[in-house]
Image (cartoon, rainbow, N blue to C red):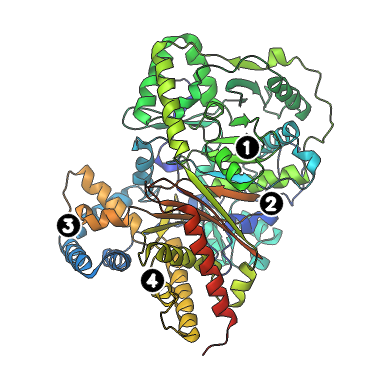
Amino acid sequence: MLNIRNFQTLRYSNTSSCLFRVSSNLKNNVSPAYQAEKHYSSQGLSDPDFLHESILPTMHFQRSLPRLKIPKLEKTCARYLESQRVILNDAEFNKTKAIVEKFQAKEGPDLHQALVALDKQNKHTSYISGPWFDMYLESRLPLLLNFNPYICYNSDSRPEYMDQVTRSTNFVVSAMRFMKTLHASKLDPDLYHLNPKKTDNEKFRRRAKWIPGSLAAYYAIMNQAFALDMSQYGNLFKSTRIPCQGRDELVRLDTARHLLVIHNGKFYTFDVLDSQGAIVPPEEIKAHLQYILADSSPRPEFSVSYMTTENRDTWASLRQHLLNGSDRNRETMKLIDGAVFCLCLDDTEPTEAVGLTRSMLYGDGANRWFDKSFQMIVAKNGVTGLNFEHAWGDGVAVLRFMNESYKDTTENAALAPGTKPADVDSVQKVTKLEFDLDPTIKTGITDATEKYNTSTGNLNIGVRQFDKFGKNFIKTKKMSPDAFMQLSFQMGYYRLTGGKVASTYESCSTAAFKHGRTETLRSATMETKKCSEAFQEGSGASVADKKKLLKACSDKHNDLTKNAAMGQGFDRHLFAMKALANKQGQSVALFEDPAYAQLNHIVLSTSTLSSPAVLAGGFAPVVFNGLGVGYGIKDEELGCNITSYPDSPNVNEFLDCVESSWVDMHQVFTLDSD
């Protein structure tokens, strides 16, 4: 393993993880990070290197955040059985119920108490942070398609700002403004306002400023505002995931001032911060990017980038061999690993949804570095997105960064179209990175490239936009829009498969707690199954019956969401106890029950995005026969971006069934009850 001076290994205490549904406003399905967005950048720019200067220090509430509570064992067992009931037949359920009852009476209490004791010894963090972090870093699966998702920015409404170099320059400057604002503790803390009129204002913030950090989060709660954990923000910049045998590491080079740029499979770096830490003038950044794009040298025959898509142990061995090969290789890898972030300049011009997903989710394997904390991808037509490594953190930090940077580039752009590049010598200031490749590395790259082509070639993508109605209509019928969409996936799968129910995952953030991660929202319920049955042709269910079932689904989904957001699901509790049992070499029947594996074989992996900055997001299925379901709920429109593999249900047939469920539910809502 390479030991690089000035790198620090990131430990459990400052990491978080998992996917898109960052948290829930139970009334309107808006994330706290999004809800607070209107306040950001409203305080003026006294320094052009900062987005804003918060009244409150960024981490003002961090010290006093409440700790994530471990659920009671009996409630976890009951919730687990409730989710199993909808998946299993009677015989299977009775067998699993007996196993759970034995677990609750024998092994469960000891494992639970051991987990509670461990939690008491580690009051600086959450009980799930360590095991969840291990889960990511110990996986040997490639990051490509298995972990890294993408989120795409909305286009700038001004076409002239969509020029590739102009947009890239503006996003680089805005990213550095975000980083500097964060590091100077001037970034406004993440707050979820239950009563924005009371707390989303300067008066509240000035009062909160005088509350000691040991009490500040409780003061916010007393005033109907919830501070969110921000521990993972420190890993957004200057960091990367390093492949190691058996378990990867996350490292960060705090002294880094340079940007990594990849174009046409070639690597470049240049400083985006000067020696005093100020952001380099945008005209100079533009000059360097133009210089890079004008480089007519041949594309490398062997691209080291492909190795970041490999099995992690394979990549670890190849990386060590590469580092041992020459001083130049070691210096090149240090520059790649420590860059503030990675900017990928693509020559493609995605114009439709499927092409956009392919570009942002995996793109040109020679033009990516999947180990970096995030890659900002800018296509030739200015379409921009992020592809991010998942071990260091989850969507909370990424989406906050996207909201801030999008707002800054569209309202306070550093570079106007037509601005002349600076008269600088890019030959001297831009470093083109080179590798010394021997036969072992060339063979490794060839193998990785073949695997990349096979895995990405197997990915199918289906997109559906529906403009007959959206969030506004659903809310008038007193149904949760998210519950509506989740029910449509259950109903669609039920119709497609002739009455089957799939194990379903919807991620819900527990960021209201110190080092909170996520909890699973199990949206396949007995309520959704009964509703799916009632909406089948020939079921005999009346309009009144269907309306009652729709309400029951919404009520159940809201209860599940509330429990998950409070850390009161069952998945993380069982996961942490299973991790303890594994470390102790203990065999536990519950975790060896095929039903446990079946429930965690996620066929429908789902996630939603809602932000003025975001156009779309997506990810691959998490199992070979599953579906990766990204969806959006706009005021007057519904949309899905779904991925599948050859063994998955047909993605377009599934979308047809989902759309038919939207139409059928809309019809029931508009009919008078019998």
Q: Amino acid at mark 3?
A: Glu
Q: Residue furthest front?
A: 538
Q: Nearer the viewer, residue 314 or 184?
A: 314
Q: Which residue is mark 1?
A: 179
- Quarter residue 238 falls in: top right
Q: Quadrant of the N terminus?
A: top left
* Sequence-first disc among 2 and 3: 2
Q: Is residue 635 visible?
A: no
Label 3, label 1: how far apart the Cα atoms are: 47 Å
Q: Position of residue 19 (x, y in %)?
A: 48, 49
Disc with the residue nearer the chain's start (2 vs 4) = 2
The percent position of residue 490, horizontal first and vertical second, equals 43, 65
Q: For marks 4 and 3, give the CA distance.
A: 32 Å
Label 3 with label 1: CB-CB less than 8 Å: no
Name the residue located 34 percent from the left edge and 35 percent from the top edge: 140
- In the rendered image, residue 372, in percent from the top left (x then y), is placed at 51, 32
Q: Which residue is mark 2?
A: 40
548 to 183, vertically: above or below: below
Q: Which label's residue is closer to the chain start, 3 or 1?
A: 3
Amino acid marked by disc 4: Lys
Identify the amino acid type marked 2: Tyr
Precedes in sequence: disc 4 or disc 1? 1
The answer to whether mark 2 and mark 3 are in CB contact below 8 A is: no
For the residues marked 2 and 1, what is the alpha-carbon distance in whole angstroms? 15 Å
Residue 107 is labelled as 3
Q: Secondary structure at mark 1?
A: helix
Few, some or many residues within 10 Å of mark 2 (<14, 14–19, 20+): some
**Which three-letter amino acid code belongs to the residue tagged 1?**
Met
